[in-house]
Amino acid sequence: MMQKDVAALNKTLGAIKKKYLNFALIGNPNSGKTTLFNQLTGKHQYVGNWPGVTVEKKEGLLVFKNTQINIIDLPGIYSLSPYSSEEIVTRNCLLYEDIDLIINIIDSTNIERNLYLTTQLIELGKPIVVILNMTDLLHKKGDKIDYALLKKLLGVPIFPLSANKHDKIEPMLDLTIQSLNRKSNANIHNLYPKEINIVLNNIEDIIRNKANRSNVSLRWLAVKLFCEDELILKQLHLTDDEVSKINYYRNSISPIKNVDRQMVVAECRYNYICKICSQTVQKHLSNEQMTLTDKIDKIVTNKFLAVPVFLALMLLIFYITFGPIGNFFKDCAEYFIEHILAKSVENLLAILGASYWAKSLVVDGIIKGVGAVISFFPQITILFTLLSILEDSGYMARAAFIMDKLLRKIGLSGKAFVPLLMGFGCSVPAILGTRILESEKDKKLTILMIPFMSCSAKMPVYSMFVSAFFPHNQVFIISSIYILGIIVAIFTAFLFKNTILKGQEAPFIMELPEYKFPTFRNLSLHVWERLKDFLIKAGTVLVCATVIIWFLQSFDFSLHMVKNQNESILAWFGMKLAPLFTLCGFNDWKACVSLLSGLIAKESVVSTSAVLYNTAAELSLSENLQLHFSAISAFAFMVFILLYTPCIAALSAIRKEMKSPLWTSIAIVYQLVAAWFCSAFVFQFCTLFFNLLGVRIL
Amino acid sequence: MTLNNLKPGQKCKVLKLHGKGKLKYRIVDMGIIPGTEVLLKRMAPFGDPMQISLRGYELSIRKSDAKNIEITDIERKPDDAKRCCGA
């Protein structure tokens, strides 16, 4: 049996003269597509971007019986219509790429809606295998599907699978190989009523000569033309004559104007599916019985409990990531970098007799950069794990459901709440976490807002100034800073929503999937994939940027290493930039240099100011600061710290997630402008206000 | 009467879809077509969106989008709500 398979396969491969086969993995969201992809390809996968669009395509190689199979994981979609970038990506892949077989994975507990896509895929006329996933859940419910009959009715090979069982992967692959030469019958039996069938046949005749460029069936193209699919119409380059002929046939079935043909086709499909399901699916559960999902939903989306449960979960995530647990791991990583890695490298360089600047480059530049990447590692891992649990379990959809009304007001979907809240911990994981958002617009908007959520690294800066200037109003001043950040973020949302990121609000029609217990295997693959991405893409930018800043901080213009920080190129910039801050009340070059050093990490503002301002050694830092700042200018400085460009690590994350240098620059310029205006406004307004108050009192 | 006027626990049949373009076909692709039985499970805590059940699965849809779905045959008792299809 096996030998026969291999022989047949070699014959197929010989016929198509290829080194490997392309299998496209397609299915609805939540059908277990990613799990299957991971099981098939294991670690041999890479994530790539499709040209022109922002939807990610994943590919992975697997070797099965001496054959290389390239699995292409396409985005989860509900239909092959041309309304979202996911759908268009999938369509174009099927139309123009060399796909040898379609693996259509469907959630057998939700078979009716899943088959809707299947009927469209079968129509393409390519070899296809339908995987009925989650059959274990189906059986647990007591429902039954007659697989043999389903196979007969649909006319395509069917394979029942429970996503978490490994042993069935091989027989499944066997089936795909056997089905390679078996083109699906594009002309599905009885799908369309007679009169529509006639029209479709006529359209097929018209386009027969035009359609050889695309490798899908005439039937599929005819159906799309019948539905007035403009993308297909354009791609086929039809003449005016042909278009008018098609229109003639199209109108022949419904003389009434404004009949929605797409709707007609959809109805045909669903009627067909209903007929199949009524013959093959046996439901055990009556509606009176509540499923586990119903029971959980009754609590987590309850009118009174939903918000407290949601907030409690958010705080728990925040606490685990940025609280003692996350911090412990972060400290460990930092300890390792500073005391073990840096020390040993330093010793090694000393033994090798490296020059002073080379040592500085390695220790203060490269290791510091690498160290920054590593020190983010634990918290990002924790946050990604928790977010993946929320996603895999099905709660994330509920979070979006609960928060939708609030966040819609600022043009975001409910899910955006999660990364926004994480922004209070650290912008880097928060920005990377925006990938839970589907819409590109939501993602950009959220990334623009996150840096204004005051991150925990800014806290030491606030404390330094608050203890020096507002010892009696610490809580009030710090809260006002945090609240100002939120206000600016909301303002940002309004501003961008009504200008650059204007656009039709995407319809919020979202499936609420059944709750599932996340599996460890899936979770680890999911998290590792995201981490790897961060390490490679954001990590390289971060290391380079740290080296550049190190250079600016350690050298003067004659390229000599400086002993004193205020002779460096960075300090020179600080001095040149200082006059810009006259209106903000801190046109002191030291303040400016501190701000520049904050680009490396916000905590550096504290250490730099401590060095620069400690001019009178007999005074404490607070007293020294009081010599250079007034209470009002100190507050304006804090406002600037809150709003201005985040650290290099966050900028690398922004660059990575925005996927565009233009948007990264927009973000940076916007942050600087916002910071300057707010800070200047606060300074001028408070000065005026207190002067007036002073005059009145006097 | 449109879907946004339904009360939690009530069941209905879809009569007609209004609107056009992306929104309309998104609704169609999710299986809401004339004849489909829909049960309104609950409203979100802030009163919007709504959680509906159809074809054996759950969907969340905003009231403003649900305005495009004209309904009929409103029943109070949610018996038979999960049976295959209405057509």
Image (cartoon, coloured by chain):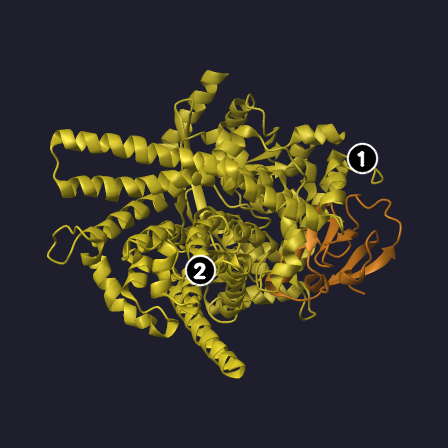
> Do discs 2 and 1 share a chain?
yes
Which disc is residue A285 wearing? Answer: 1
Query: Does the image show residue A58?
Result: yes
Q: Which chain is yellow?
A: A
Relative to A39, residue A367 above or below = below
Residue at the disc numbered 2 = A642
Name which of mark 2 and mark 1 comes first in the sequence: 1
Q: Is residue A479 left or right of residue A18?
A: right
Location of residue A198 (image quadrant): bottom right
- Horizontal and vertical percent position of residue A639: 44, 64
Q: Nearer the viewer, residue A660 or A610?
A: A610
What is the crowding at mark 1: few (fewer than 14 residues within 10 Å), some, or many (at least 20)? few
- Horizontal and vertical percent position of residue A293: 72, 39
> What amino acid is found at the position of numbered circle 2 in the picture?
Leu
- Horizontal and vertical percent position of residue A397: 63, 47
Q: Nearer the viewer, residue A379 or B79?
A: A379
* Inter-mark Cα distance, 2 to 1: 56 Å
Q: Is residue A676 left or right of residue A390?
A: left
- Horizontal and vertical percent position of residue A378: 44, 37
> What amino acid is found at the position of numbered circle 1 in the picture?
Leu
What is the crowding at mark 2: few (fewer than 14 residues within 10 Å), some, or many (at least 20)? many
Query: Does the image show residue A210?
Result: no
Q: Which chain is orange?
A: B
Looking at the rendered image, the disc whose residue lies closer to the viewer, 2 or 1, is: 2
Q: What chain is tagged by disc 2? A: A
